[in-house]
Image: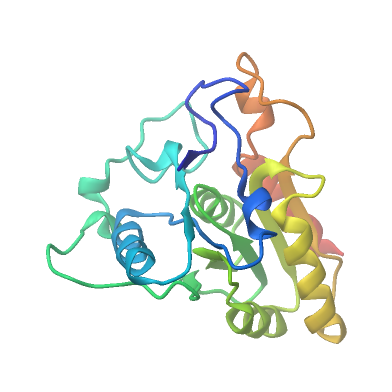
Amino acid sequence: MPCGGGIYGGQTHSQSPEALFTQVCGLRTVMPSNPYDAKGLLIAAIENDDPVIFLEPKRLYNGPFDGHHESPVVPWSQHALGEVPEGYYTVPLESASVFRAGSQLTVLAYGTMVFVAEAAARETGIDAEIIDLRSLWPLDLDTIVASVKKTRRCVVVHEATRTCGFGAELLSLVQEHCFYHLEAPIERVTGWDTPYPHAQEWLYFPGPARVGAAFLRAMEA
């Protein structure tokens, strides 16, 4: 199921509906951030006995978009994660990946926001550990908790609206499992609580400037 904005699709073709599906009991929800994971997760989804919602961020079809819409995107053919083996392999449906190792704060992201968070870390100079969730439900809570306990700070990033977005669940789980390890309030960067605007798309899209500002707030708290 294609999802997300960044393609001038307007309010009817830019939604991020993952939170609608993650609350359905028995339904698995995944969102890959790159071609390698997409193939592995899709094969695992086909082989799994449970129904799986497979969400595809449209803005990543051409390459690893980092939120800088004014610059051309490097095609997947020139990116390491664009190399997809022809043979059989799977990516476990319940597994997150440490996309970027770091020590100063943990970023929980998925889909397009993984690369936006990477750009924000690079531009702010903050040593952020970026967790690519891949599977939104079931969630790889062990990887999340281990990272937050290590860095003691957490930023949640997603493109969907803020109110009742999936980030609220992530924030609650981190607060529940890592409360005594946190040295700063958990930051959340999301889309606005409005329909996705066609003419003002990049004011809505949570780009690296907004994500980077959240990193700085978390570090300064």
Residue 8 vs 38, above or below: the answer is: above
Query: In what quadrant of the picture does the N terminus appear?
Result: top left
Q: Residue at x 65, y 40 (%)?
A: 206
Residue 181 visible, this orientation: yes
List x then y, in percent, for residue 106. 65, 70
Residue 216 visible, this orientation: no
Q: Nearer the viewer, residue 45 or 172?
A: 45
Q: Which residue, as the protein is rendered here, is positioned at the far left?
A: 86
Left or right of residue 88, residue 70 in this image: right
Q: Nearer the viewer, residue 98 or 88?
A: 88
Left or right of residue 41, residue 83 in this image: left
Q: Which residue is drawn at 59% across and 23% down?
A: 12
Q: Which residue is drawn at 83% across and 79% down?
A: 176
Q: Which residue is drawn at 63% across and 64% down?
A: 107
Residue 112 vs 141, above or below: the answer is: above
Q: Nearer the viewer, residue 98 or 32?
A: 32
Quarter of the view holding residue 169 = bottom right
Quarter of the view holding residue 10 = top right
List x then y, in percent, for residue 15. 60, 34
Query: In what quadrant of the picture does the C terminus appear?
Result: bottom right
Quarter of the view holding residue 32 = bottom left
